[in-house]
Protein backbone atom coordinates (compact mmCIF):
# COMPACT_ATOMS: atom_id res chain seq x y z
CA UNK A 1 0.00 0.00 0.00
CA UNK A 2 2.91 2.34 0.78
CA UNK A 3 4.26 1.52 -2.68
CA UNK A 4 0.85 2.17 -4.26
CA UNK A 5 0.54 5.49 -2.51
CA UNK A 6 4.05 6.42 -3.61
CA UNK A 7 3.15 5.84 -7.27
CA UNK A 8 -0.14 7.76 -6.90
CA UNK A 9 1.67 10.74 -5.44
CA UNK A 10 4.26 10.48 -8.20
CA UNK A 11 1.48 10.79 -10.81
CA UNK A 12 0.05 13.79 -8.93
CA UNK A 13 3.53 15.35 -8.78
CA UNK A 14 3.89 14.91 -12.54
CA UNK A 15 0.67 16.93 -12.98
CA UNK A 16 1.99 19.60 -10.60
CA UNK A 17 5.19 19.85 -12.66
CA UNK A 18 3.20 20.16 -15.90
CA UNK A 19 1.25 23.00 -14.31
CA UNK A 20 4.44 24.73 -13.23
CA UNK A 21 5.93 24.43 -16.71
CA UNK A 22 2.79 26.04 -18.12
CA UNK A 23 3.32 28.97 -15.74
CA UNK A 24 0.56 27.75 -13.47
CA UNK A 25 0.12 27.00 -9.79
CA UNK A 26 1.94 23.69 -9.31
CA UNK A 27 -0.66 21.51 -7.64
CA UNK A 28 -1.53 18.16 -9.19
CA UNK A 29 -4.01 15.42 -8.46
CA UNK A 30 -5.11 12.00 -9.71
CA UNK A 31 -8.19 9.90 -8.97
CA UNK A 32 -7.41 6.18 -8.81
CA UNK A 33 -9.95 3.34 -8.84
CA UNK A 34 -10.04 0.16 -6.75
CA UNK A 35 -7.79 -1.62 -9.25
CA UNK A 36 -5.12 1.06 -9.15
CA UNK A 37 -6.07 2.51 -12.55
CA UNK A 38 -5.97 6.28 -12.95
CA UNK A 39 -9.48 7.50 -13.76
CA UNK A 40 -8.64 11.16 -14.05
CA UNK A 41 -5.72 13.53 -13.68
CA UNK A 42 -5.41 17.27 -13.50
CA UNK A 43 -3.61 20.29 -12.21
CA UNK A 44 -4.59 23.72 -11.03
CA UNK A 45 -5.75 25.82 -14.02
CA UNK A 46 -6.27 29.23 -12.40
CA UNK A 47 -3.67 30.96 -14.52
CA UNK A 48 -3.77 28.83 -17.69
CA UNK A 49 -7.56 28.89 -18.08
CA UNK A 50 -8.35 31.86 -15.87
CA UNK A 51 -10.34 29.47 -13.71
CA UNK A 52 -11.29 30.06 -10.07
CA UNK A 53 -12.71 26.53 -9.66
CA UNK A 54 -10.29 24.23 -11.49
CA UNK A 55 -8.16 23.39 -8.50
CA UNK A 56 -6.11 20.25 -9.11
CA UNK A 57 -8.57 17.94 -7.35
CA UNK A 58 -11.58 19.39 -9.20
CA UNK A 59 -9.64 19.13 -12.49
CA UNK A 60 -8.88 15.46 -11.79
CA UNK A 61 -12.54 14.72 -10.99
CA UNK A 62 -13.62 16.61 -14.10
CA UNK A 63 -11.11 14.73 -16.23
CA UNK A 64 -12.47 11.42 -14.88
CA UNK A 65 -15.87 12.36 -16.27
CA UNK A 66 -19.20 11.05 -15.03
CA UNK A 67 -18.72 8.06 -12.76
CA UNK A 68 -21.12 5.95 -10.77
CA UNK A 69 -21.41 6.56 -7.01
CA UNK A 70 -19.98 3.09 -6.46
CA UNK A 71 -16.74 3.95 -8.31
CA UNK A 72 -16.02 7.04 -6.20
CA UNK A 73 -16.71 5.06 -3.05
CA UNK A 74 -13.85 2.69 -3.84
CA UNK A 75 -11.38 5.25 -5.14
CA UNK A 76 -8.40 7.11 -3.73
CA UNK A 77 -7.71 10.77 -4.47
CA UNK A 78 -4.05 11.77 -4.59
CA UNK A 79 -3.12 15.42 -4.36
CA UNK A 80 0.22 17.15 -3.94
CA UNK A 81 -1.14 19.70 -1.43
CA UNK A 82 -3.64 19.56 1.41
CA UNK A 83 -7.13 20.15 -0.10
CA UNK A 84 -8.88 23.49 0.41
CA UNK A 85 -12.51 23.68 1.59
CA UNK A 86 -13.90 23.38 -1.96
CA UNK A 87 -11.90 20.28 -2.81
CA UNK A 88 -12.66 18.85 0.64
CA UNK A 89 -16.33 19.32 -0.16
CA UNK A 90 -15.95 17.55 -3.51
CA UNK A 91 -14.37 14.58 -1.69
CA UNK A 92 -17.31 14.53 0.73
CA UNK A 93 -19.91 14.87 -2.05
CA UNK A 94 -18.62 11.77 -3.81
CA UNK A 95 -17.78 9.92 -0.59
CA UNK A 96 -14.22 9.23 -1.66
CA UNK A 97 -13.00 7.15 1.30
CA UNK A 98 -9.27 7.91 1.20
CA UNK A 99 -7.22 11.00 0.37
CA UNK A 100 -3.44 10.87 0.08
CA UNK A 101 -1.77 14.26 0.43
CA UNK A 102 1.76 15.08 -0.71
CA UNK A 103 2.30 17.76 1.92
CA UNK A 104 0.47 20.10 4.26
CA UNK A 105 3.34 22.39 5.23
CA UNK A 106 2.76 25.12 2.64
CA UNK A 107 -1.01 25.00 3.15
CA UNK A 108 -3.24 23.05 5.49
CA UNK A 109 -6.82 22.68 4.30
CA UNK A 110 -9.89 21.14 5.87
CA UNK A 111 -8.27 17.84 6.88
CA UNK A 112 -10.07 17.82 10.22
CA UNK A 113 -13.45 17.99 8.47
CA UNK A 114 -12.45 15.09 6.20
CA UNK A 115 -11.47 12.98 9.22
CA UNK A 116 -14.61 14.01 11.15
CA UNK A 117 -16.69 12.72 8.22
CA UNK A 118 -14.85 9.39 8.18
CA UNK A 119 -12.39 9.98 5.32
CA UNK A 120 -8.96 8.39 5.75
CA UNK A 121 -6.32 11.11 5.35
CA UNK A 122 -2.72 10.13 4.70
CA UNK A 123 0.04 12.75 4.69
CA UNK A 124 3.14 11.72 2.72
CA UNK A 125 5.25 14.73 3.76
CA UNK A 126 6.88 14.61 0.32
CA UNK A 127 9.97 16.76 -0.06
CA UNK A 128 9.56 17.39 -3.81
CA UNK A 129 5.95 18.51 -3.34
CA UNK A 130 7.04 20.90 -0.63
CA UNK A 131 9.90 22.39 -2.63
CA UNK A 132 7.95 23.02 -5.83
CA UNK A 133 5.02 24.59 -3.98
CA UNK A 134 7.30 26.74 -1.86
CA UNK A 135 9.13 27.95 -4.95
CA UNK A 136 5.88 29.02 -6.62
CA UNK A 137 4.59 30.79 -3.50
CA UNK A 138 7.86 32.78 -3.29
CA UNK A 139 7.74 33.64 -7.00
CA UNK A 140 4.01 34.46 -7.23
CA UNK A 141 2.56 35.30 -3.82
CA UNK A 142 -0.40 37.21 -5.32
CA UNK A 143 -1.63 34.35 -7.50
CA UNK A 144 -1.20 31.95 -4.61
CA UNK A 145 -3.22 34.10 -2.24
CA UNK A 146 -5.93 34.51 -4.86
CA UNK A 147 -6.14 30.73 -5.19
CA UNK A 148 -6.90 30.28 -1.49
CA UNK A 149 -9.27 33.25 -1.35
CA UNK A 150 -6.91 35.47 0.62
CA UNK A 151 -6.21 39.16 -0.04
CA UNK A 152 -2.90 39.79 -1.84
CA UNK B 1 -33.24 43.39 0.89
CA UNK B 2 -36.20 40.99 0.48
CA UNK B 3 -36.76 42.56 -2.93
CA UNK B 4 -33.07 42.18 -3.80
CA UNK B 5 -33.08 38.55 -2.77
CA UNK B 6 -36.23 37.96 -4.81
CA UNK B 7 -34.55 39.27 -7.95
CA UNK B 8 -31.38 37.26 -7.27
CA UNK B 9 -33.40 34.07 -6.92
CA UNK B 10 -35.31 34.98 -10.07
CA UNK B 11 -32.02 35.16 -11.99
CA UNK B 12 -30.96 31.81 -10.53
CA UNK B 13 -34.34 30.33 -11.49
CA UNK B 14 -33.87 31.55 -15.05
CA UNK B 15 -30.60 29.60 -15.18
CA UNK B 16 -32.34 26.51 -13.79
CA UNK B 17 -34.99 26.78 -16.51
CA UNK B 18 -32.32 27.13 -19.20
CA UNK B 19 -30.71 23.97 -17.88
CA UNK B 20 -34.02 22.13 -17.92
CA UNK B 21 -34.70 23.20 -21.50
CA UNK B 22 -31.28 21.86 -22.48
CA UNK B 23 -32.25 18.51 -20.96
CA UNK B 24 -30.09 19.13 -17.92
CA UNK B 25 -30.52 19.06 -14.17
CA UNK B 26 -32.48 22.26 -13.40
CA UNK B 27 -30.38 23.96 -10.78
CA UNK B 28 -29.26 27.55 -11.34
CA UNK B 29 -27.06 30.01 -9.51
CA UNK B 30 -25.80 33.58 -9.73
CA UNK B 31 -23.04 35.41 -7.90
CA UNK B 32 -23.91 39.02 -7.13
CA UNK B 33 -21.50 41.73 -6.00
CA UNK B 34 -21.95 44.40 -3.32
CA UNK B 35 -23.64 46.71 -5.83
CA UNK B 36 -26.18 44.14 -6.89
CA UNK B 37 -24.47 43.43 -10.21
CA UNK B 38 -24.39 39.84 -11.41
CA UNK B 39 -20.75 38.75 -11.66
CA UNK B 40 -21.43 35.25 -12.88
CA UNK B 41 -24.29 32.92 -13.69
CA UNK B 42 -24.53 29.23 -14.38
CA UNK B 43 -26.51 26.05 -14.22
CA UNK B 44 -25.74 22.43 -13.59
CA UNK B 45 -23.89 20.98 -16.62
CA UNK B 46 -23.66 17.29 -15.69
CA UNK B 47 -25.67 16.13 -18.65
CA UNK B 48 -24.91 18.86 -21.18
CA UNK B 49 -21.14 18.81 -20.73
CA UNK B 50 -20.77 15.41 -19.10
CA UNK B 51 -19.39 17.24 -16.08
CA UNK B 52 -19.27 15.87 -12.54
CA UNK B 53 -18.06 19.17 -11.08
CA UNK B 54 -20.08 21.88 -12.86
CA UNK B 55 -22.85 22.14 -10.32
CA UNK B 56 -24.76 25.38 -10.69
CA UNK B 57 -22.81 27.19 -7.97
CA UNK B 58 -19.43 26.09 -9.38
CA UNK B 59 -20.60 27.09 -12.87
CA UNK B 60 -21.58 30.56 -11.60
CA UNK B 61 -18.22 31.01 -9.87
CA UNK B 62 -16.42 29.80 -12.99
CA UNK B 63 -18.44 32.15 -15.18
CA UNK B 64 -17.50 35.07 -12.89
CA UNK B 65 -13.84 34.36 -13.65
CA UNK B 66 -10.91 35.31 -11.46
CA UNK B 67 -11.96 37.76 -8.77
CA UNK B 68 -10.10 39.34 -5.89
CA UNK B 69 -10.67 37.92 -2.39
CA UNK B 70 -12.27 41.25 -1.44
CA UNK B 71 -14.98 40.87 -4.10
CA UNK B 72 -16.10 37.43 -2.91
CA UNK B 73 -16.17 38.67 0.66
CA UNK B 74 -18.83 41.23 -0.23
CA UNK B 75 -20.89 39.06 -2.54
CA UNK B 76 -24.06 37.00 -2.27
CA UNK B 77 -24.48 33.61 -3.91
CA UNK B 78 -28.00 32.75 -5.04
CA UNK B 79 -28.87 29.15 -5.82
CA UNK B 80 -32.19 27.46 -6.54
CA UNK B 81 -31.35 24.41 -4.38
CA UNK B 82 -29.55 23.87 -1.09
CA UNK B 83 -25.80 23.53 -1.86
CA UNK B 84 -24.13 20.11 -1.69
CA UNK B 85 -20.85 19.59 0.18
CA UNK B 86 -18.71 20.61 -2.81
CA UNK B 87 -20.54 23.87 -3.40
CA UNK B 88 -20.62 24.52 0.34
CA UNK B 89 -16.84 24.14 0.30
CA UNK B 90 -16.51 26.59 -2.59
CA UNK B 91 -18.53 29.14 -0.59
CA UNK B 92 -16.20 28.60 2.38
CA UNK B 93 -13.04 28.79 0.25
CA UNK B 94 -13.96 32.23 -1.06
CA UNK B 95 -15.55 33.37 2.20
CA UNK B 96 -18.82 34.37 0.55
CA UNK B 97 -20.71 35.80 3.52
CA UNK B 98 -24.30 35.17 2.44
CA UNK B 99 -26.04 32.38 0.54
CA UNK B 100 -29.66 32.66 -0.55
CA UNK B 101 -31.28 29.30 -1.31
CA UNK B 102 -34.44 28.83 -3.35
CA UNK B 103 -35.50 25.69 -1.54
CA UNK B 104 -34.17 22.84 0.60
CA UNK B 105 -37.13 20.47 0.38
CA UNK B 106 -35.91 18.33 -2.52
CA UNK B 107 -32.38 18.26 -1.17
CA UNK B 108 -30.76 19.61 1.96
CA UNK B 109 -27.03 20.15 1.70
CA UNK B 110 -24.42 21.24 4.21
CA UNK B 111 -26.31 24.28 5.51
CA UNK B 112 -25.29 23.55 9.10
CA UNK B 113 -21.62 23.68 8.15
CA UNK B 114 -22.15 27.02 6.39
CA UNK B 115 -23.82 28.44 9.50
CA UNK B 116 -21.18 26.96 11.79
CA UNK B 117 -18.52 28.81 9.75
CA UNK B 118 -20.38 32.09 9.98
CA UNK B 119 -22.13 32.20 6.62
CA UNK B 120 -25.60 33.75 6.60
CA UNK B 121 -28.02 31.24 5.05
CA UNK B 122 -31.40 32.42 3.84
CA UNK B 123 -34.04 29.92 2.67
CA UNK B 124 -36.64 31.41 0.32
CA UNK B 125 -38.85 28.29 0.20
CA UNK B 126 -39.66 29.20 -3.42
CA UNK B 127 -42.54 27.27 -4.94
CA UNK B 128 -41.29 27.43 -8.54
CA UNK B 129 -37.85 26.15 -7.54
CA UNK B 130 -39.47 23.26 -5.70
CA UNK B 131 -41.76 22.30 -8.57
CA UNK B 132 -39.14 22.32 -11.31
CA UNK B 133 -36.67 20.33 -9.23
CA UNK B 134 -39.30 17.83 -8.17
CA UNK B 135 -40.35 17.34 -11.78
CA UNK B 136 -36.79 16.58 -12.86
CA UNK B 137 -36.20 14.15 -9.99
CA UNK B 138 -39.37 12.23 -10.94
CA UNK B 139 -38.39 12.18 -14.61
CA UNK B 140 -34.69 11.34 -14.17
CA UNK B 141 -34.02 9.75 -10.78
CA UNK B 142 -30.76 8.13 -11.95
CA UNK B 143 -29.15 11.37 -13.16
CA UNK B 144 -30.27 13.11 -10.00
CA UNK B 145 -28.78 10.46 -7.74
CA UNK B 146 -25.54 10.55 -9.70
CA UNK B 147 -25.36 14.32 -9.18
CA UNK B 148 -25.45 13.94 -5.39
CA UNK B 149 -23.10 10.96 -5.36
CA UNK B 150 -25.79 8.43 -4.47
CA UNK B 151 -26.24 4.99 -6.04
CA UNK B 152 -29.04 4.82 -8.63
CA1 LIG C 1 -3.20 22.25 -18.55
CA1 LIG D 1 -25.44 25.49 -20.77
ZN1 LIG E 1 -9.03 23.21 -3.68
ZN1 LIG F 1 -23.07 21.23 -5.51
Image (spheres, coloured by chain):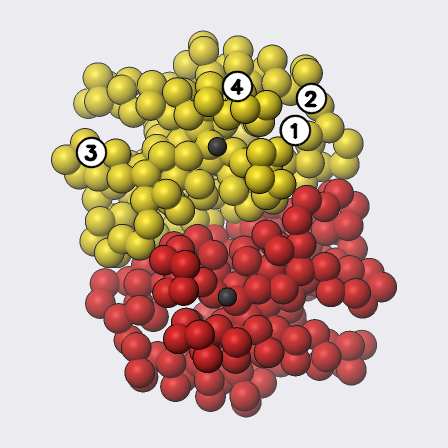
Chain colours: A yellow, B red
Q: Residue furthest right?
A: B35
Point out the tag, 4 or 1, that comes first from the N-terminus. 4
Callout 4 secondary element: helix
Residue placed at 51% from the left, 38% from the top?
Answer: A55
Direction left: furthest residue = A35
Q: Looking at the image, do the residues carrying marks 2 and 1 touch, with CB atoms under 8 Å apart?
A: yes
Instruction: Tell me if mark 3 has few (under 14), some (14-19) or many (20+) residues whose alpha carbon lies within 10 angstroms of its own.
Output: few
Q: Position of residue A41 (x, y in %)?
A: 36, 34
- Please state which of the two labelled residues, at mark 2 or mark 4, is closer to the viewer: 4
Judging depth in this view, the residue of B134 and A64 nearest the camera is A64
Q: Quadrant location of the N terminus of chain A?
A: top left
The numbered mark, 4 or 3, whose residue comes first in the sequence reads 4
Give the residue pinned by disc 1.
A144
Residue under mark 1: which chain is it in? A
Disc 2 and disc 1: Cα gap in Å? 6 Å
Tag 2 residue:
A140
- Mark 2 and mark 4: span between their CA atoms? 14 Å
Sequence-wise first label, 2 or 4? 4
Disc number lying in front (4 or 1): 4
* Residue with the mark numbered 3: A37
Both labels 2 and 1 in a single chain = yes
Q: Same chain, marks 1 and 3?
A: yes
Sequence-earlier tag: 1 or 3: 3
Question: Circle 3 sits in a helix, a strand or a loop, which is it?
Answer: loop
Task: Please give the residue where the numbered disc 4 appears in the rendered image.
Answer: A21
Amino acid sequence: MAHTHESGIMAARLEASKGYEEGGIPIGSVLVDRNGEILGRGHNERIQRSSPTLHAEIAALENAGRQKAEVYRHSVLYTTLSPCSMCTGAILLYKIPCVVIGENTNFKGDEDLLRARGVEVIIMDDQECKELMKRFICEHPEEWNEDIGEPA
